[in-house]
Each structure stands twice: as structure tokens, then as C-alpha cells.
Image: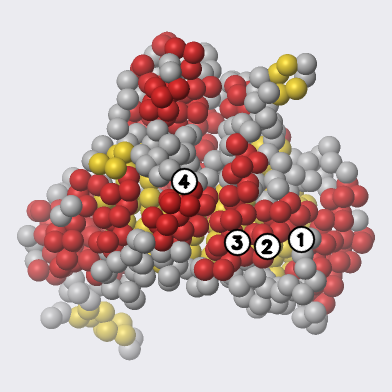
């Protein structure tokens, strides 16, 4: 063994002497230069060991691979940290990408939209097999399970810009090439609305409904109760501590089903849930199911520490879905989402024992802060929520009142480090941020937005009361103005507002901005 001395520290120049992070960086650099894993593994037993750690840390799992997964992974399953489980649905052709209702019988219509089978068997069988396999893993593991459900045909028809990729952290995004790959493509498919790289006609409503349909909405269960009973008989999976359901899943898991799915993960500590909003009268029904989901989380997922919910949307879709008759929208598709006050309060209740909560567009801060006076958040360190009130055309008195109420609630959060209230859509971005720096006994309130908000003395006084509970702290105010023209979507708003990176998965934010870029010039509401 060879080592060098520098002062009192010994630097081991062997492979094992390098920090694990450095070893992985070297291996990644070699693979990017074209070296194969097989060639690298022959260098030494130490390299083989590190390559196994690298190779097995993140795994893509499909239904076809699930059959022999237990035997193939058994020796190395302790190395697995992340599983991307891909439920690939059957492919479909142009006769099914945007079906015409009038040309089909009711049964045929349901068959075209039904989501009950993958290309390797029924969803129920595949999910049962997954839970059965993972239920045997070390119950003290800390496994991230990322579930995607899509058809490879989704990006071959009307929605060319869609991508289905594994989750990545923000520091991994630079090298994946997803943005460059998508934006460099020139789509030319007039049949599906694309000419010379630009969308010249909107997709039919049926095409949108196709990719946003409910999972197992038409079966195999004859009632909601029987589906819930099916979920409840699945074996518990204590190895899973983090669950990702990202926005690239346009197919909708029913919130009630998710409540029973989540309950099968008894050690669940972190959930990232990025559903899409509804585009018709189904929103009120889905909202009732959201109440059921968040009520279930509050009762059964008692180990949960971090809950991130981001209800995604696209401002082009309401312009397509709305059908007006005498100024009344028959589709019941709101141009801008109106969050349910009941859901906001249920999410607040579910957050009482959390350390981190982020809830975007599915709640409104003005409702969230209407709490029971006895509620307290002893563990909460960060809170990020949205509010429709943060818009230049809203009543400034109501905005001030909401921010003062937020300060009163912050006093009930003794560990709070950051609170962010924000809003964003095309042409609009706004962020109110409270950040406490305990090491220097200082707090900063930041207003960053596409318009200027005047902080009333009563609002400043309310937040001074938050700081004064620590004694001797200083409160500073910062105002920053953003260019309205730069905000082309809510994705741009998140980016320019510099909202906490926990508000949405970094890869999801990139996909949202890619979609917005691909649809530039398309009508919005």
C-alpha cells in the first residue's frame, strides 16, 4: 500500500482509499467516455464491487422482468436504493388515439379507454406480484419506489413532446440530455396537428381524455368497495419508505385507491404525489376522493415526515375542453383551478405531525390557515403552499389579511425555518417567503413577483411577532421584481421565483417547461 503524508493526515492513494463519492464520479466519467460496465469490472475486484453498487442502486423494473426479479436480484438487493416500476400499457394505433364517440357503441367506447391491462397481463396481477416480491425485502431498508403508468403510443400521436424517464435529482439533470433531445426534434405529422415542428391544430377532446383516463376505472372491480378490499389484502411492504407518483403519469390513479395503496407501506416516510387536475365535471368527484386520501394519510401513515403534492395543469387544455352555450361552460372545466376549502383544511390536519409539507394548486393558503385554534405543528420545518390571492387583480386587503393569518399560524410551528406562499401561471409569478436563520438570529421576508406588493404595517407587525418569540432577532424585508414576459407557464414561475426545489421533482419541472416550449403560441385561457 502506498500513502502520502500531508501534515498529520495520511492520504491513501489506493482505490479503496478514495472516498466512495470520488470513486463513483470516476466510474461515471469513464462510462460517459464509452467504457462498458463489463470492461470496467475486469480491472479489479474492488472496481467490480463499486460497479455493482452503482449498477444496482437504481433499477428499472417492468412487469416482464418481475417474474424472475427475486432470483436475479437476491445477492445484490441490499444495494438497491431506487426502483422505477414501469407499468407499460398496450400500444394503440390511430383508430384509438382520438376515438369519435358517435361512431362507437357504449361498450366499444369503454373498451378503447379502459386501463386494466399492461402489455404483460392485468394490472391487478402485476401489482400483486410487485407487492409480493418487495414484501420479502429487509423491513429495515430505505427503498424509493417510483411508479409510472403509460403507453409507449402516447408520444406517437398528438403529444409528441411527452417523455417517460426515471426520476433524477437536480444535480443529475445536466447530463441526461432530455431537454436538448426533445427540443431538437422537428415533428411533422399533420394528421396529429404537427407541421414543421409546430402544433397547428389542437388535439380533440377525446385525445386528451384518452391519456388522462382513470386507472382501473372500468374494471376489473364491480364496485369501489371491492377494489378497496383488493388493495387491503395485498401484503405489507415495510421496505418502501419513499413513494413517487410523478406528473409524467397522466393516467389517473384514483385518490381512494391510493389511500389503500399507501396503507400497505407501514414505514412510509416520504410521498411525492403529482396528479393532474381534472378537465371536466369530474373535478368535484375527485375532490371528494382527495378528502378520503388525505384523511387516510392522517390516520394510517403515522411515520410520514414529508408530503409533497403538486397538482399539475396545462393552460391550453381548458381552451380545448370548454364548450360554451349562452356563456355557460357545459364541460364544467374551470379556466383556473378553484381549490376546495375542505381539502385545504384536511391537508392542514394531515400535516400536524409532518416535518415538511408542500401542497401546490390543490389547496389554497387562505383556506389552509383557517385552522382549529388548538392545532400545532411541533415538527414542521418547512411549508410551501399556493394561493390564488397572490395576483395583481386581487384585493390587497385580502392578501394582507391572509399573510397576517399565516404569521399567526407560524407561531404554532416552533421549528419553522421556511414558509413560502406562491402562485404562478402564464404572465404571473408571485412568492412571499419567510426564512429564519437561527445561527445568526435573523429572519428575512422576501417578496418576489411580476408586480409590486406593498407590505402594510399590520402585516409587518404580524411577522415581527413571529420573530420576537425568539428574542433579539432582526427581521429584514426584500423586494424583487420579475419580468412578466419571461413567465410562459407555471413551470417558468417556479424557476424564476426560485421556489424551494421540494415543490416538485426536478425532472418534473423540466418536463413541464419542455411541454410549454413545445406548445409556444398555442391558445391558453
Give the Cα distance between marks 3 and 4.
21 Å
Q: Helix, strand or loop at disc 2? A: helix
Q: Earlier in the sequence, mark 3 or mark 1?
A: 3
Residue drawn at x 81%, y 58% as measured from the top left = 403
Give the Cα distance between marks 2 and 1.
8 Å
Look at the image and tell me whether residue 43 can be seen: yes
Q: Residue furthest bottom?
A: 8
State which quadrant residue 159 falls in. Answer: top left
Q: Which residue is mark 2?
A: 348
Q: Helix, strand or loop at disc 4? A: loop
Q: Which residue is mark 3?
A: 295
Q: Helix, strand or loop at disc 3? A: helix
Mark 3, residues whose alpha carbon is within 10 Å: few (<14), some, or many (≥20)?
some
User: Who is closer to the viewer here, 136 or 231?
Assistant: 231
On screen, 290 above or below 525? Answer: below
Q: Earlier in the sequence, mark 2 or mark 1?
A: 2
Q: Name the front one of labels 3 and 4.
A: 4
Whether label 2 touches label 4, CB < 8 Å: no
| Residue 182 falls left or right of residue 514 | left
Give the Cα distance between marks 1 and 4.
36 Å
Q: Which residue is mark 4?
A: 223
Whether label 1 touches label 4, CB < 8 Å: no
Q: Which residue is mark 1?
A: 369
Residue drawn at x 26%, y 37% as measured from the top left = 119
List x then y, in percent, for residue 402: 82, 56
Mark 1, residues whose alpha carbon is within 10 Å: few (<14), some, or many (≥20)?
some
Q: Name the front one of labels 3 and 1.
A: 3
Amino acid at each position: 500500500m502506498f500513502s502520502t503524508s500531508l501534515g498529520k493526515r495520511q492520504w491513501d492513494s489506493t482505490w479503496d482509499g478514495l472516498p466512495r463519492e470520488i470513486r463513483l464520479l470516476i466510474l461515471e466519467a469513464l462510462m460517459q467516455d464509452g467504457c462498458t460496465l463489463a470492461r470496467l469490472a475486469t480491472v479489479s475486484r474492488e472496481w467490480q464491487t463499486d460497479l455493482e453498487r452503482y449498477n444496482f442502486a437504481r433499477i428499472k423494473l417492468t412487469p416482464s422482468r418481475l417474474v424472475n426479479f427475486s432470483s436475479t436480484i437476491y445477492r445484490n438487493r441490499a444495494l438497491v436504493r431506487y426502483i422505477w416500476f414501469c407499468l407499460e400499457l398496450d400500444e394503440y394505433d390511430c383508430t384509438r388515439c382520438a376515438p369519435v364517440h358517435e361512431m362507437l357503441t357504449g361498450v366499444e367506447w369503454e373498451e378503447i379507454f379502459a386501463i386494466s391491462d399492461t402489455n404483460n397481463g392485468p394490472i391487478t396481477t402485476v401489482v400483486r406480484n410487485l407487492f409480493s416480491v418487495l414484501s420479502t425485502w429487509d423491513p429495515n431498508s430505505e427503498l424509493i419506489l417510483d411508479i409510472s403508468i403509460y403507453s409507449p403510443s402516447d408520444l406517437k400521436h398528438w403529444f409528441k413532446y411527452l417523455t417517460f424517464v426515471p426520476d433524477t435529482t437536480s444535480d443529475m439533470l445536466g447530463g441526461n440530455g432530455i431537454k436538448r433531445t426533445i427540443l431538437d426534434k422537428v415533428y411533422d405529422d399533420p394528421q396529429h396537428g404537427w407541421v414543421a415542428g409546430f402544433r397547428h391544430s389542437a388535439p380533440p377532446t377525446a385525445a386528451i381524455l384518452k391519456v388522462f383516463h382513470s386507472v382501473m376505472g372500468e374494471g376489473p372491480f364491480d364496485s369501489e368497495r371491492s377494489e378497496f378490499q383488493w388493495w387491503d389484502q395485498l401484503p405489507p411492504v415495510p421496505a418502501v419508505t419513499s413513494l413517487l407518483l410523478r406528473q409524467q403519469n397522466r393516467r389517473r390513479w384514483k385518490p381512494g385507491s391510493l389511500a389503500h395503496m399507501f396503507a400497505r407501506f407501514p414505514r412510509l416516510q416520504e410521498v411525492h404525489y403529482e396528479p393532474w387536475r381534472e378537465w371536466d365535471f369530474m373535478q368535484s368527484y375527485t375532490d371528494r376522493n382527495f378528502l378520503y386520501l388525505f384523511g387516510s394519510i392522517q390516520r394510517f401513515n403515522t411515520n410520514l415526515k414529508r408530503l409533497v403534492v403538486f397538482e399539475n395543469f396545462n393552460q391550453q387544455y381548458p381552451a380545448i375542453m370548454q364548450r360554451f352555450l349562452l356563456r355557460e361552460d357545459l364541460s364544467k372545466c374551470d379556466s383556473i383551478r378553484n381549490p376546495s376549502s375542505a381539502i385545504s383544511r384536511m391537508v392542514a390536519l394531515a400535516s400536524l405531525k409532518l416535518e415538511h409539507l408542500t401542497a401546490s394548486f390543490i389547496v389554497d393558503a387562505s383556506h389552509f390557515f383557517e385552522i382549529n385554534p388548538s392545532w400545532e405543528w411541533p415538527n414542521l420545518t418547512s411549508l410551501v403552499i399556493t394561493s390564488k390571492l397572490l395576483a395583481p387583480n386581487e384585493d390587497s386587503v385580502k392578501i394582507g389579511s391572509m399573510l397576517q393569518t399565516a404569521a399567526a399560524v407560524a407561531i404554532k410551528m416552533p421549528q419553522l425555518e421556511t414558509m413560502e406562499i406562491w402562485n404562478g401561471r402564464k404572465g404571473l409569478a408571485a412568492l412571499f417567503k419567510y426564512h429564519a436563520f437561527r445561527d445568526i438570529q435573523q429572519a428575512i421576508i422576501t417578496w418576489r413577483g411580476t408586480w409590486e406588493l406593498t407590505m402594510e404595517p399590520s402585516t409587518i407587525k404580524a411577522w415581527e411577532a413571529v420573530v420576537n418569540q425568539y428574542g433579539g432577532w432582526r427581521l429584514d424585508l426584500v423586494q424583487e421584481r420579475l419580468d412578466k414576459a419571461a413567465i410562459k407557464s407555471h413551470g417558468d414561475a417556479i424557476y424564476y421565483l426560485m421556489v424551494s426545489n421540494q415543490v416538485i421533482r426536478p425532472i418534473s419541472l423540466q418536463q413541464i417547461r419542455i411541454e410549454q416550449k413545445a406548445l409556444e403560441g398555442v391558445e391558453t385561457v
